[in-house]
Amino acid sequence: LGAGALLVPVGLGWDGLSWLPRALLVAALGLAAAAGGVGWARATRSAFTLSMAAAGAVVALLVSTGDALR
């Protein structure tokens, strides 16, 4: 699911989108991945999975911010 979601911008023509839709799309994908990671961490009671979900959210935020500033 995650890999398929990453192909969405490519199919939409990533360079054809303005910075705001790209930033929102990356942020939404990052939040969805983080939410899935938090759900998995709660189900497995794994602190490692929870930390990876948080790291994924931070990376998505940095990528979307960097793309917006570019």
Image (cartoon, grey):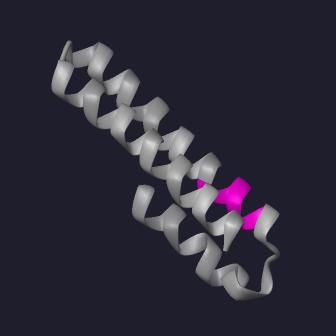
In the image shown, does 21 or 58 lie closer to the viewer? Answer: 58
Residue 47 included in the magenta stretch of the image: no
x and y percentages locating residue 28 in the rendered image: 64, 47
Q: Viewed as shown, does residue 66 lie left or right of 40?
A: right
Q: Main secondary structure of the magenta part?
A: helix
In the image shown, does 23 or 11 lie closer to the viewer? Answer: 23
In the image shown, does 25 or 68 lie closer to the viewer? Answer: 68
Q: Residue at x 79, y 78 (%)?
A: 17
Establish if 2 lies above or below 35: below
x and y percentages locating residue 10 in the rendered image: 60, 82
Report the label total: 0
Q: Viewed as shown, does residue 53 lie left or right of 18?
A: left
Establish if 54 lies above or below 17: above
Q: Quadrant of the C terminus?
A: bottom right
Which residue is situated farthest in the front direction here? 69
Q: Residue at x 63, y 74 (%)?
A: 9
Where does the magenta region start and end?
A: 21-26
Residue 22 included in the magenta stretch of the image: yes
Q: Viewed as shown, does residue 24 lie left or right of 58?
A: right
Q: Residue at x 82, y 75 (%)?
A: 18
In the image shown, does 11 or 49 lie closer to the viewer? Answer: 49
x and y percentages locating residue 42 in the rendered image: 31, 14
Q: Quadrant of the N terminus?
A: bottom left
Q: Residue at x 20, y 18 (%)?
A: 44
Q: Viewed as shown, does residue 14 lie left or right of 45?
A: right
